[in-house]
Amino acid sequence: MTVTKQEVAHIAELAQLELDDAQSEQAKNDFSHILTLIKQLETVDTTGVTALISPLTAMSDASLRLRDDVPAPRSTAAQREALMANAPAQEDGLFLVPTVIE
């Protein structure tokens, strides 16, 4: 699959990049190569292949390291006051921030 110079220029404009002629030609070749590889991958027959959660699950001796899904202990009032002492502005236990959008 080939990419045109106009498409490279459009992508460069979207990415806010300034490419000289040599860089533009290199990007054109790179994009074409990447799209060719993707087209090759699309032709692979994956029927009957089970999706993996992680590539490590394909290895028989690897196990996922998962933590127990338990809630963290609630903070105490003293811990909250210590944390809120660092806030430049606060109200009712919440951080106050300046208005950015009117």
Image (spheres, rainbow, N blue to C red):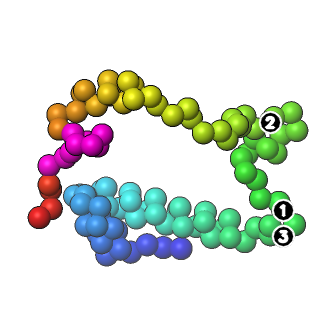
Residue 95 to residue 73: above or below: below
* Dot 3 and dot 1 residues touching (CB under 8 Å): yes
Mark 1–mark 2 Cα distance, whole angstroms, equals: 20 Å
Q: Identify which residue is drawn at 17% across, 34% down.
A: 88
Q: Identify which residue is drawn at 84% across, 70% down.
A: 47
Q: Identify which residue is drawn at 60% across, 66% down.
A: 38
Say whether residue 75 is left or right of residue 50.
Answer: left
Mark 2, residues whose alpha carbon is within 10 Å: few (<14), some, or many (≥20)?
few
Camera-nearest residue between 39 and 78: 78
Q: Residue 63 carries which label?
A: 2
- Tell me the residue that label 3 is attached to: 47
- Residue 2 in the image: state x and y as whole percent: 48, 73
- Residue 93 in the image: state x and y as whole percent: 30, 40
Q: Reading the chain from its start, which is encountered first: label 3 or label 2?
A: 3
Secondary-structure class at tag 2: loop
Mark 1, residues whose alpha carbon is within 10 Å: few (<14), some, or many (≥20)?
few
Which amino acid does the dot numbered 3 rest on? Thr
- Tell me the residue that label 1 is attached to: 49
Q: Give the range drawn in magenta.
A: 90-98
Residue 62 to residue 29: above or below: above
Residue 11 to residue 79: above or below: below
Which amino acid does the dot numbered 1 rest on? Val
Mark 3–mark 1 Cα distance, whole angstroms, equals: 6 Å
Q: Reading the chain from its start, which is encountered first: label 1 or label 2?
A: 1
Residue 49 is inside the magenta segment: no
- Residue 10 in the image: state x and y as whole percent: 30, 72
